[in-house]
Amino acid sequence: MRGFVLSVLSVVFVCCNLLGQTVEPSAAVGKDILQLEFETLYSVEKSATLKNTTWNIPNVLVRYGLSDNVELQLHTPFTKDRCFENNGLTSTIFSFKEVELGVSLNLWGQRNIRPEAAILVRAISATESFGFKEIGNMVSLNFSNTIGQKFTLGYNIGTTTDLDKHTSGFYVLNLDYAPNPKIHFFVENTVNFNWDSMQSNCIGLGAGFKMGGNLFMDFSAAKSLLHDMFYTGAIVTWAIKTKKP
């Protein structure tokens, strides 16, 4: 997912279960770093007389560096869905259906044109059971190339299996430009597909800045190229050193 922070804090972008900014970093956060990411994402989808809106309020992603090469993750996605017909509200649903537990493992660093790489694995459990009867997963290979002093090309490829055992693939391509350590801009393409057809294809734009200390904020917006959908969101990231040198 990140050329914003090129240090032990890792680089951060908006991550979510919807189709907004989704690129994952190609390296774990540093050892003893606790990184908290608070994200809100709002999406609108229209079809004929129907309109659906989804609001993440907020999603929370916790990352912790066991070492400089291994990172543990906890993701708790909260959503509020509203359905409209002829501009009239027909239903409102608040849901907290899943908890995701994961680990990111560094594979190797960048060397010349060979990209930096990490593998990310998450188990997805239903909140009603918190067991292994209903469990899904996400697996992705995450790569990045630093280009000169200011550009970073990040790209992911992977699969997701939901609680109903439906599997789909995805890839993400992200180009980041950081004119200085305090601000960055990015453009991103996110595609989800099954083995028969492309399910979604979104183009996103965004920017982020350092608010001070170890606090960062990112904004993004994305538009589907296949459907009448639009997404916009923001994320606040706080990185904490849990142990003093």
Image (spheres, helix red, strand yellow):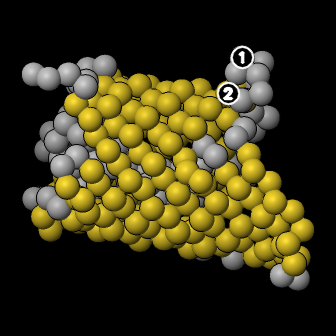
- Asked if labels 2 and 1 touch by Cβ distance under 8 angstroms, the answer is yes
Residue named by callout 2: 125
**Looking at the image, which is closer to me, 144 or 244?**
244
Q: Amino acid at mark 2?
A: Ser
Where 28 sits versus 85, above or below?
Answer: above
Q: Amino acid at mark 1?
A: Phe
- Say which label, 1 or 2, has the lower sequence index: 2
Q: Quadrant of the C terminus?
A: top left
Q: Position of residue 30 (x, y in %)?
A: 23, 30
| Residue drawn at the location 33% of the way across and 68% of the way down | 207
| Residue drawn at the location 14% of the way across and 58% of the way down | 181
Dividing the picture into quadrants, the one containing residue 103 is: top left
Dividing the picture into quadrants, the one containing residue 43 is: bottom right
Q: Secondary structure at mark 1?
A: loop
Cα distance in 3D space between marks 1 and 2: 7 Å
Q: Position of residue 176 (x, y in %)?
A: 28, 62
Q: How many badges with numbers are in the image?
A: 2
**Looking at the image, which is closer to me, 90 or 132?**
90
Does 52 sit left or right of 1 as displayed?
right
| Circle 1 Cα neighbour tier, 10 Å, few/some/many (<14 / 14–19 / ≥20) | few
- Residue 47 in view (yes/no): yes
Does 189 sit left or right of 196 as displayed?
left
Q: Secondary structure at mark 2?
A: strand
Disc ID at residue 113: none
Where 189 sits versus 5, above or below?
Answer: below
Disc ID at residue 132: 1
| Residue drawn at the location 55% of the way across and 51% of the way down | 58
Q: Position of residue 125 (x, y in %)?
A: 67, 27
Dividing the picture into quadrants, the one containing residue 226 is: bottom right
Q: Position of residue 222 (x, y in %)?
A: 52, 70
| Residue drawn at the location 12% of the way across and 64% of the way down | 180
